[in-house]
Amino acid sequence: MLRRGLRALLPLAILLQGAEAVDNGLALTPQMGWNTWNTFGCNIDESIIIGAAKALKDLRLDEYGYHYVVMDDCWSLHKRNGTGYLQYDPRKFPNGIKHLADEIHAMGLGFGMYSSAGKLTCGRYPGSLHFEEKDADLFAEWGVDYLKYDNCHNEGQSGTPLISFERYERMSRALNATGRPILYSMCNWGEDSPWDWAPSIANSWRMSGDIVNVFDRYDDRCPCEDYICRLPGHHCSIMNIINKAAPLGQKAHAGGWNDLDMLEVGNDNLDYEEQKLHFTIWAMVKSPLIMGHDIMQTSEETMRILTNTDILDLNQGRWHTGFRSYKKEKSQLWLQDSKDQTGNMAVALINNGDEDGEFTIDFKDIFLDEWNRRKVGYEVTDLWTKESLGIVEDKLVVKVKRHSVFAGKMEFKGDPEMKPHSKKLHGGTDEL
Ligand SMILES: *[C@@H]1O[C@H](CO)[C@@H](O)[C@H](O)[C@H]1NC(C)=O
Ligand SMILES: *[C@@H]1O[C@H](CO)[C@@H](O)[C@H](O)[C@H]1NC(C)=O
């Protein structure tokens, strides 16, 4: 009886749980690591990638979960060999890719590779379209653990979800057929709504055009303000991507995540507060956390952000995928429910306005569906300063600097009988 009652309450959640995940056992929490592109672009070689892997280890970032070292575009020659296989550029990789993968594995890290579901990659090197099996076999032979799979030069094979699905599914099947578990990170920029069809074939899918290290600026190179977009583009600001990602959290689940693109933490042009905001929301919506800064030059400030274990816990720990409670002109409220039945909540108040401010967060905007919990006490801890704000009831008042975020954990102090009695209809089906 009770079961049936719950089912009646949760048709959407049950339906989504039925959606099949790509069954490679990877990305049960969002993947974390570092990628060459944001800092080095096409100027990559073996010594840069090994140097970055060593820096990651020296900084002990692997102990915080940053595991994959991903080599982006421009690693190959411009021609396939006589039997149709990709060839690495021997000037950049004098010892070959297998050697590079071995070195990275010897450090206990995972090695990521790049290609495009097109005739050419974005840098105009050979892409994997029509060569999926050959390329997947070669990647597996080299010891690749991760594939970022781009969308450039796709010969017009997009425009409907089915066309895009079939193109990306071919690589998914080819990777599976190698027998080597390879994390499949789709990068089709949110074209044709991948959140609807990628979960059964990929571990993550980009949901917008490329990120740029700008906090909030309209740019015609990234013309869409909404998640349905005909021209995803690039130069998408942090706030542009946040606004597009807000409704998509419900599509995330263990093994399949919305990818908001690589982190701009540690890159110039964003101040410390903007970087905190960026990192907090990427964590809350359970985006992969792939660093993109010059890791050999990591500052203390950058380390403070990347190693905030409370924020990392929102991404990797027992929290449902975050979602937005409201969007006002100069502020937004984001929420995340605990998975562990404690009744705990995480809240983030974004001040995207240009002035420092004080914000009152009403409990009715936090406990959207649980009316009975709007009047009970919660102990609040600031996840950036680590200070306790004491026990609060009814509302929470926070000071937030311009372009910054308040992130707090709310620990339930009320009657245990008032613990949440149901999984939410919002926040995704990200059960492990
Ligand atoms: C390939 O797919 C099957 C069926 O979904 C799955 O059981 C298996 O673990 C996959 N293998 C790899 C290497 O991803
Ligand atoms: C092409 O590359 C593949 C994989 O590295 C190799 O097995 C094959 O022998 C090469 N073919 C030629 C003609 O060099």
Image (tube, rainbow, N blue to C red):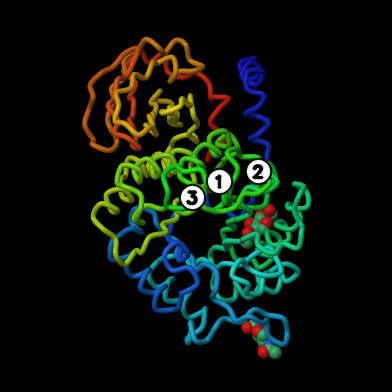
Residue 409 versus residue 357: which sits nearer the camera? 357
**Residue at mark 1: C-beta within 8 A of ligand 1:** no
272 to 142, vertically: above or below: above
Q: Secondary structure at mark 3?
A: loop
Which numbered circle lies on residue 288?
3
Residue at (43, 20) in percent of width and height: 366
Image quadrant containing the N terminus: top right
Front position among marks 2 and 3 = 2
Q: Residue at x 42, y 52 (%)?
A: 213
Residue that numbered label 1 is attached to: 257
Tag 3: residue type? Pro
Check the image and report above or below for 77 versus 279. below
Quadrant of ligand 1: it is: bottom right
> SS for tag 1?
strand
Check contact, mark 1 vs mark 3: CB within 8 A: yes
Task: Work out whether mark 2 precedes mark 3 in sequence or the reverse, and give the earlier one.
Answer: 2
The relative height of residue 316 versus residue 139 in the rendered view (above or below) is above
Q: Quadrant of residue 373?
A: top left
Residue at image location 26% in from the left, 18% down from the top: 391
- The x, y position of residue 266, in whole percent, is 34, 55
Packing grade of label 1 (10 A; few <14, some 14-19, many >=20) is many
Residue type indicated by callout 2: Cys
Q: Which residue is mark 2?
A: 229
Which three-letter amino acid code belongs to the residue tagged 1? Trp
Task: Return the residue nearer the eye: 151 or 205.
Answer: 151
- The image quadrant that residue 295 belongs to is bottom left
Instruction: Give the CA separation, mark 2 to mark 3.
Output: 21 Å
Q: Give the structural element (helix, strand or loop) at label 2.
A: loop
